[in-house]
Amino acid sequence: MSSTARRSSPRGVALTPEDCSPLASTLSVVSIAARPKRLPAPPRRRLLLRRGSMSRASLHVWCSTKRVVSGVQPTGMVHLGNYLGAIKNWVALQDLYETFFFIVDLHAITLPYDAPELSKATRSTAAIYLACGIDSSKASIFVQSHVRAHVELMWLLSSSTPIGWLNRMIQFKEKSRKAGDENVGVALLTYPVLMASDILLYQSDLVPVGEDQTQHLELTREIAERVNNLYGGRKWKKLGGRGGNLFKVPEALIPLAGARVMSLTDGLSKMSKSAASDQSRINLLDPKDVIVNKIKRCKTDSFPGFSLKLFTSTFSLPNSSIRKKAHGIEFVYSSLEFDNPERPECRNLFSIYQIITGKTKEEVVSECQDMNWGTFKTTLTDALIEHLQPIQARYEEIMSDPGYLDNILLEGAGKASEIADITLNNVYQAMGFLRR
């Protein structure tokens, strides 16, 4: 696929997921918003790949030649938001693309942390990846710090990243305000550059992100284009390189559902490991009684739901064979609703139930809209326990065999290093460093 096609319109590359695989039914490839004016962008062309526009075989080839990279921090317990928003979708992605999934332990030290717990949490997160269905024969699974090219490339990229780009990052502003200046290290400001390194090292085509993470991916794209302009093309060729771009400019891969799971105590806040109350999240390893209690106590509302339904009826005039149509609006009462913006907790719990059960939005509404909260919470709790129990059993099995986990991480780091080292050496060469 040409670079012109990859740099599509803000609507992006729209794949009909079934064309690639039934497993991809919750995924959509979209482009990040238009770049700021300071970086002139080439003319964009909208590319829509819909069923029938190319053969099924061609679409499978297109998917299999694309590379996807993603990771999760090993801080705190992996929770339902991490699972539904990221890891569960990775299981589908590994059958569609060349995939690299890693534990981003270097990102975990940007704020104060418990050093003795870091290695334990890293192993636990890797085991959860596997327990959730990530297959090491299909995807490369590794620890970020085990591939040293991540840190080296970050330093090289930092030299070309304007400080103003980092100052505008929303998450830095929010986290630094909460932690206070004395508790904020430089790493909190510069970690988006490390994130760019994580992505660009592997010449990634697609990056799974939540809707709240697109700003960081946009920064990655800007850094890639800036370095390509500064050091790529003929400049690199004059130094003995192959010329052309040093980095691919990646696109965002945003799930159509479950992209952002919200807190159980506040439907307007994202479910987070850093939230003070454990009641705000369902951890993947929570036992049955804890899940029951958390769902029972989660925040709901007493908002009466109403919807408008248009109807048409046909009737005959008295003593006449002439039939007339009448149109009207019917007020329909429903206890629970999916898309009412004034009911964020209801929408969040419905969304969780939809992803956990694999049902369509219409099926969830049909099944649950007339339930009261007590009935729906019981239904949701049963679905969660049934879904998480096999994951918890598999996790315990993996953690009982340390050698098995170590071998998978070692093999994954080896595969990742082969690709990362090629990219890193090219950047060193293009930036004028003496070859090793």
Image: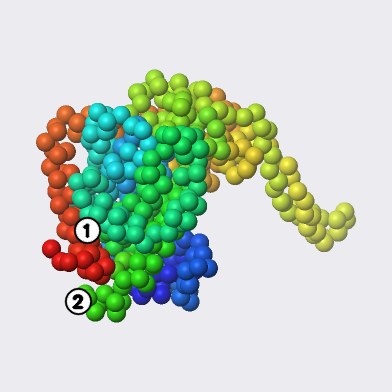
Residue shown at the point (45%, 21%) measured from the top left: 293
**Element under disc 1:** helix
Q: Are marks 1 and 2 in contact (CB under 8 Å)?
A: no
- Residue 141 seen in render: yes
Q: Which residue is tagged 2?
A: 240
The amino acid type found where label 2 is placed reads: Gly
- The one nearer the camera, 94 or 152, is 152
> Compared to 133, does 46 lie above or below?
below
Quadrant where the N terminus lies?
bottom left
Q: How is the image coloured?
A: rainbow
> Compared to 246, does 102 lie above or below?
above
Give coordinates of residue 331: x percent, y percent. 73, 42
Where residue 117 is drawn, which disc sits there? none
Q: Which residue is tagged 1?
A: 420
Which circle's residue, 1 or 2, is located before the other in the chain? Answer: 2
- Image-quadrant location for residue 5: bottom left
Residue shown at the point (13%, 63%) measured from the top left: 436
Give coordinates of residue 327: x percent, y percent. 77, 54
**Mark 1 Cα shell of 10 Å, populated few (<14), some (14-19), many (≥20):** many
Give coordinates of residue 352: x percent, y percent. 46, 38
Give coordinates of residue 178: x percent, y percent. 49, 34
The amino acid type found where label 1 is placed reads: Ala
Taking the image as shown, residue 120 lies to the left or right of residue 194, namely left
Residue shown at the point (58%, 29%) measured from the top left: 300
Camera-nearest label, 1 or 2? 2
**Mark 2 Cα shell of 10 Å, populated few (<14), some (14-19), many (≥20):** few
- Residue 59 seen in render: no
Taking the image as shown, residue 332 lies to the left or right of residue 298, namely right
Cα distance, mark 1 to mark 2? 20 Å
Residue shown at the point (16%, 58%) measured from the top left: 418
- The one nearer the camera, 130 or 173, is 173
